[in-house]
Image (spheres, rainbow, N blue to C red):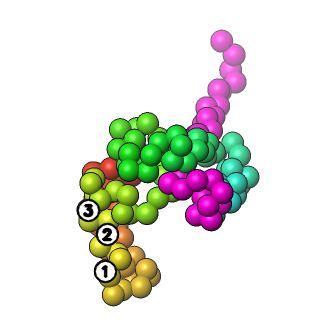
Amino acid sequence: MSGAASIATAEEVVLNAVHFTPTQNGYAQSFLKFVQKVNEKGKGVVQINVRGGPEVIPPIQQGAALRNGLIDVIDTPAGQFLELVPEGEVFSASTKTPWEVRENGGWDFISGIFEKKANA
């Protein structure tokens, strides 16, 4: 046994993702730009592997796929989660700005519900 201490290195985390619209759609293009930035800045730490869009998992099934661990990230509106997390639509009726919702604890509260109900 050598006297040198072994150094543990963390492995890069790879997150599997899908988006809810066809790739050529503007929503998907915005998500893919986000993924590109994460993958550039996250080398050695985290990478996002985009599996595709609705051709891979239909949008209405993406929430269940996330909850069941089949995928790790979804680019989708809260409305696609209504069967799992109906509370997700609360922000569309809010009179508060996103900053106010974060300050008053609303974001953390809803995030906890998403984590519990949808593994999100």
Question: Whole-Å distance between the Cαs marked 1 and 3?
Answer: 13 Å
Question: How far is mark 2 from mark 1, CA to CA?
Answer: 7 Å
CB under 8 Å between callouts 2 and 1?
yes
Q: Residue at x 38, y 45 (%)?
A: 61
Q: Position of residue 85 (x, y in %)?
A: 28, 58
Find out whether the residues at labels 3 and 2 contact each other: C-beta distance under 8 Å: yes
Depicted 80 relative to depicted 103: above or below: above
Provide the residue span drawn in magenta: 1-29
Residue 117 drawn at (x, y percent): 27, 51
- Give SS at disc 2: helix
Residue labelled with disc 2: 89
| Magenta-colored segment: predominant secondary structure | loop
Instruction: Name the residue rendered at 50%, 54% in the picture.
Output: 20
Residue under numbered circle 1: 93
Give yes or no for contact between labels 1 and 3 (Cβ–Cβ under 8 Å). no
User: Which quadrant is home to the N terminus?
Assistant: top right
In this rendering, the answer to whether 54 lies above or below 76 is above
- The amino acid sitting under disc 3 is Pro
Residue 13 painted magenta: yes
Callout 3: SS: helix
**Residue 29 vs residue 48, the one in the foreground:** 29
Circle 1 SS class: helix
Residue 81 point in image, percent of width and height: 34, 56
Mark carried by residue 86: 3
- Most extreme residue toward the right is 40
Amino acid on which disc 2 is placed: Glu
Depth order, front residue of 115/56: 56
